[in-house]
Image: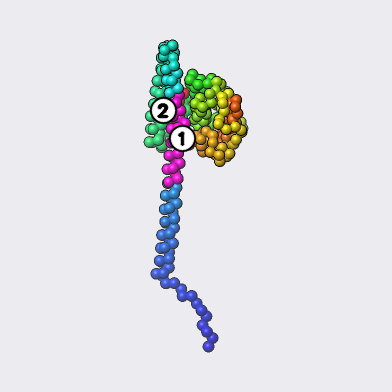
Amino acid sequence: MPAAPFELPFPSDRVLEGLAREVITNASADHFVSDRHKEFTSALNERLRLARELHDGFLQTLTGATLQLEAALRLVETDRHGARAQIREAQQLLIEQQRELRAWIDEVRHPEGPRTGVRADLATVLGTLCRRVSRWGPRVDLHATDAERIPASMADDVCRLVEEGLSNVTRHARAKVARVEVRMAGNAIRILIADDGCGFPFRGRLDLATLTARGIGPASLMERVRSLSGRLVLASTLSGSRVEIELPSNAHSCAPMFRSP
């Protein structure tokens, strides 16, 4: 008699049920791990965003107030009127920052609520910022003739970038004059921050990728540009520096909108 063909035993219903249960369990575990990873990544990104906002906004304001108080100390013996004016301005700066901080904390606590946004046009806010820096640092020349074309969703990021750039100039460049340009070029926002100071500790014209790879350059400025999928080029010479930034006008802004002029 010919040998019966070899056949694999068909698994029983109980075995199939066990296999199905194992597949579902593994899939659920993978889904759980994926969800936890997403939650962790989201929380980490939020922490980085909050740290960047504190650094680029509130710490820069405190730096400005400190510089004004230092200027007042230098004047207190020779020009008491000037010293009082510097102290009043530092006081007003801190009052404004306190108001912004309260609004910012409220928006962090209630992210589903409406955001206040820039309460005045961007050119006005930038003008206020540049005049403020000019009173305790280098003279700042602002050119923002078509700032009204910049989308409102990007206004806060533009302000933060200019604020951080000017803070770097004031603290490190020993410059007498700084220049800020903000304009639209097609679908891109272009920002220039230049000064006649001593430049960065390195020399040359470097893009964002090179600066990142070498671990040099203005870290907070670079991080914000990177988060907005923008481009940055930094030129540093013995006679000053230039920071050129280009942002897509439809970039997703991650900054809470709370600024006022």
The residue closer to the viewer here, 38 or 245, is 245
* Image spot of residue 198 (x, y percent): 56, 26
Mark before the other along the chain sequence, 2 or 1: 1
* Residue numbers of the magenta segment: 40-64
Location of residue 183 by image quarter: top right
* Image spot of residue 57 (x, y percent): 45, 30
- The relative height of residue 40 versus residue 27 in the rendered view (above or below) is above
Residue found farthest to the bottom? 1
Left or right: residue 246 compared with residue 63: right
* Residue 181 seen in the figure: no
* Residue 100 seen in the figure: yes
Residue visible at 40% across and 20% down in the picture: 91
Residue visible at 44% across and 55% down in the picture: 30
Left or right: residue 108 compared with residue 186: left
- The relative height of residue 77 versus residue 11 in the rendered view (above or below) is above
Q: Which residue is mark 2?
A: 100
Q: Which residue is mark 1?
A: 52
Residue visible at 44% across and 62% down in the picture: 23
Mark 2, Cα crowd under 10 Å, few <14 / some 14-19 / many 20+, is some
